[in-house]
Amino acid sequence: MPTFIPRRALTFGLAAIPLALDSAVRAAGVEGLAHASESIHQEVTFAASRQRVYDVLTTAKQFDAVTRLSDGLELLNRPGARATAISSELGGEFVLFGGYITGRHLELRPAERLVQAWRAGSWKSGDYSIVNFSLRDEGASTRLVFDHRGFPEGEGASLSSGWHRHYWEPLAKFLA
């Protein structure tokens, strides 16, 4: 089975290589190939429909309200802060938390999935990670299954707690 780099990864300058390489590629000793990296997997349930959760994540006015419920509010009020903006187009840009978080939409499937090339302002120029928000019915609620990969080494612990503080907790308040 050949190894490939998805076209969308090339489009955004991302080095996305499948984790499951066949034994022939491993045996060849591909130079520069790492076999371990940090990733984040979180699951959280919200008392709202999948469409409602998706809309909050993809609508600037609603996401701005979520930000104002988090400790990210200080980022909105700092000098030079950029307004929350979220494109509704595939490949479109988003600006969150006063411009500290930026990126582009890689996949938009309303009420099902949102995949983004995502970066924090403290990262080196050109460093992007991939975030995937998958939405599933859980009775009258929505189960959000979240995966974050490809972020700079050593950022995992901070990002993992940040998703709870800046996204899940204020999102739960907003949807209540």
Image (spheres, grey):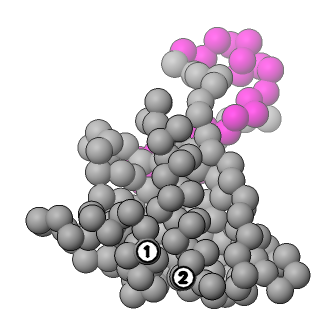
In primary-sequence order, the first of circles 2 and 1 is: 1
Residue 49 percent coordinates (x, y): 72, 86
Residue 73 percent coordinates (x, y): 32, 69
Residue 134 percent coordinates (x, y): 70, 67
Three-letter code, disc 2? Phe
Judging from the image, what secondary structure is the residue with disc 1 in?
loop
Q: Is residue 20 magenta?
A: yes
Three-letter code, disc 1? Leu
Q: Residue at x 44, y 56 (%)?
A: 118
Asked whether disc 2 touches disc 1, contact meaning CB atoms under 8 Å apart, the reply is yes
Magenta segment main secondary structure = loop
Q: Check the image and report above or below for 41 versus 145.
A: above
State the mark number for residue 69. Answer: 1
Circle 2 residues within 10 Å: few <14, some 14–19, many ≥20:
some
Q: Check the image and report above or below for 60 versus 30.
A: below
Q: Is residue 105 magenta?
A: no
Q: CA distance from mark 2 to mark 1?
A: 8 Å
Give the residue at the far right of this rendering.
139
Q: Is residue 161 left or right of residue 78?
A: right
Q: Check the image and report above or below for 49 versus 108.
A: below
| Location of the N terminus (image quadrant) | top right
Residue 87 seen in the figure = no
Judging from the image, what secondary structure is the residue with disc 2 in?
helix
Magenta stretch bounds: 5-31
Q: Nearer the viewer, residue 36 or 15?
A: 36
Residue 65 percent coordinates (x, y): 41, 82
Q: Nearer the viewer, residue 22 or 41?
A: 41
The residue pinned by badge 2 equals 174
